[in-house]
Image (cartoon, rainbow, N blue to C red):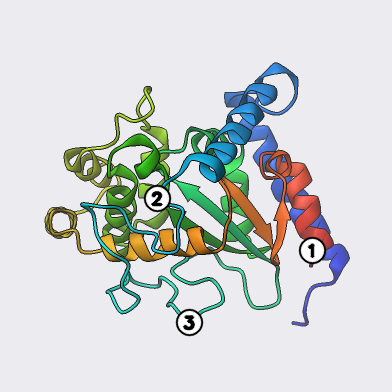
Amino acid sequence: MGQKSRRERAAEARGVAQASEKRRERTVRFIGGAAVVVVMAAIIGVAVYASSNSPSNDASGSLDGVVQPDPDAALPAGVLTADSATPFGVPYGNGGADVPVLELWEDFQCPACGALEEANGAGIEQLAEEGLVQLIYRPTAFLDANLGNDSSHRAVAAWGCAIDAGKTLEFHNAVYANQPAEEGVGFTDEQFVSFASESDLGEADLATFSQCVTDGTYLAWAANSNQEFSTSQIGGTPSGFLNGEAVGTEVLADPVALADLVASKS
């Protein structure tokens, strides 16, 4: 079969968006009304905080007491290498080389990232699963320095362990679904193991995951990706880019608007 036309891609993208919108409306009416104002204020607030107050936003990307970046350090299965167009990113979905690339910068301790996940995480995932975008998650850990802990680095590292176990999306979503109510409380290793357990890992795989977390196997990957965030001067999270062009958070959070934008780039 030949490549799909732009009109066919647009129809598919809108269908994905409409399906996502219906599911979302059954749970929370996030777009429109006062709720979106609160969410957007939170997103903007975190972005400003990242750009103006984060002592870790220097060229090193490191955090004292955690780990230094090491471009030669081990990477989880399928994570992109240092010399790729999106270094240390996590690809997800079925998008081929002929569809737009959607990059999404996130910090697991970022409340606004959790709000975006609630608003349109499912829609973003479905665009990737339907092959309408190449979705690349770009993890960062800048909030560790702001909040005085190491939970963002450790959450990214634990995600790497889950990626190795074939639970990329399940673990990612579980962390956001279980963000502490109070910012700065952070996560424990026991919580990470619990999130993995809820992802239906078998006993042997769960034991491997637990050891991977305990050993901090992918802490250097977390530091590497955080360094990319710092040197790229992203400014805050969540931040999205479609084919390298910034996407407003109001578009990322709106299934129909994002699907229309994706279709226009196809």
Q: How far, Cα to Cα, is label 2 from label 3? A: 21 Å
- The image position of residue 136, as x and y in percent, is 54, 63
Q: Is residue 192 visible?
A: yes
Residue lying at the far top of the rendered structure: 34
**Mark 2 packing: few (<14 Cα in 10 Å), some, or many (20+)?**
many
In three-dimensional space, the C-alpha distance between marks 1 and 2, rounded to whole angstroms, equals: 35 Å
Front residue of 259/47: it is: 47
Position of residue 126 relative to residue 23, above or below, is below
* Residue located 59% across and 60% down the image: 103
Q: Amino acid at mark 3?
A: Asp
Residue identifier under label 2:
141
The furthest residue to the right: 7
Secondary structure state at the residue bearing disc 1: helix
Give SS at disc 3.
loop
Reading the chain from its start, which is encountered first: label 1 or label 2? 1
Q: Are marks 1 and 2 in contact (CB under 8 Å)?
A: no
Q: Is residue 42 above or below residue 137?
A: above
Mark seen at residue 9: 1
Q: Label 2 amino acid?
A: Ala
Left or right of 40 in this view: 129: left
Mark 1 → mark 3, Cα distance in angstroms: 30 Å
First in sequence: mark 1 or mark 3?
1
Instruction: Residue 62: name its quadrant.
Output: bottom left
Tag nearer the camera, 1 or 3: 3
Marked residue nearer the N-terminal end (2 or 3): 3
Residue 237 visible? The answer is: no
Q: Disc 3 designates what residue?
A: 83
Give the position of the N terminus as an image quadrant: bottom right
Mark 1 belongs to which amino acid? Arg
Q: Position of residue 85 (x, y in %)?
A: 56, 76
